[in-house]
Amino acid sequence: MNRSQRIFIAVKIDPENNLLRLHSSLKALLGSEKINWVDPSNIHLTLAFLGDTEEERIKVAAIMLKQKCSGFGEFNFSLSGAGVFKDFRDPRVIWIGIKNPEKLVELHDTIRTGLEDTGFQTDDRPFRPHITIGRIKFIRNIEALKNTIERYRDTEIQKVIASEVILYESILKPSGPVYKPAGIFNLRGNG
């Protein structure tokens, strides 16, 4: 039987001290709220979420990624500022924003075109590059959340060098998701 896996395409973020400090201070300040915090080792920037995908289709995606990523070129961007999706009346996700996202947007568009060309359904919402650091289940003190986010609104947190794109399998476990690389695609050259 053809097994399907939850798949997404992302740039891995290796958290440095500022990001780790921000992560732990948000956790401490909002400690009494029901928030599922992303494990620092799982922090990434999603370029495309493909959901449940059959093995044959994963191979197709991998071939496309190898073609599209090779020679795209390594680039930098900065993690900067924090915010929430949807909004403070109904916050669902705590995110860190991206400064200078132009090359990320270009990479996203390249991969999205590649996915569409190979028959994948893609999300037609505009791409808003960010990293998720917490998923809010329930929050009582919206003011505390607002004040905490406000404190980091314009803070530059970390520079990131994007040198590869990773095709991840997301394995859902009671302790939280485990992300397993199913393919790593070098942006520099033929890697």
Image (cartoon, grey):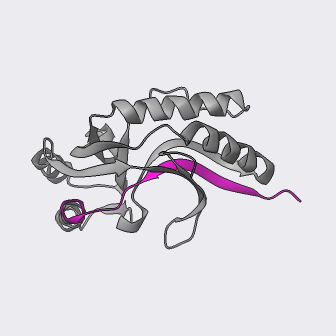
Decide if residue 112 is on the left or right side of residue 97. right
Decide if residue 183 is on the left or right side of residue 157. right
Q: Which residues are magenta?
A: 1-20
The residue depicted at 54 percent of the width and 72 percent of the height is 174
Q: Quadrant of residue 182?
A: bottom right
Decide if residue 118 is on the left or right side of residue 99. right
Residue 100 versus residue 124 in the image, above or below = below
Quadrant position of the N terminus in the picture: bottom right
Q: Return the x and y of residue 93 as percentages of the image width and height.
A: 36, 48
The residue depicted at 22 percent of the width and 62 percent of the height is 30
Residue at the front extreme? 190
Residue at the bottom extreme? 175
Decide if residue 75 is on the left or right side of residue 99. right
Q: Return the x and y of residue 110 as percentages of the image width and height.
A: 54, 30
Residue 127 visible in the current orientation: no
The residue depicted at 77 percent of the width and 54 percent of the height is 55
Magenta-span inclusion, residue 14:
yes
Foreground residue, 86 or 130?
A: 130
Residue 177 versus residue 103 in the image, above or below = below
Query: How many numbered badges does the structure rendering display?
Result: 0
Magenta-span inclusion, residue 191:
no
Q: Return the x and y of residue 95 as percentages of the image width and height.
A: 31, 47
Foreground residue, 92 or 46?
A: 46
Q: Quadrant of residue 20?
A: bottom left
Foreground residue, 112 or 89?
A: 112
Residue 171 versus residue 95 in the image, above or below = below
Residue 141 visible in the current orientation: yes
Q: Return the x and y of residue 59 as percentages of the image width and height.
A: 74, 49
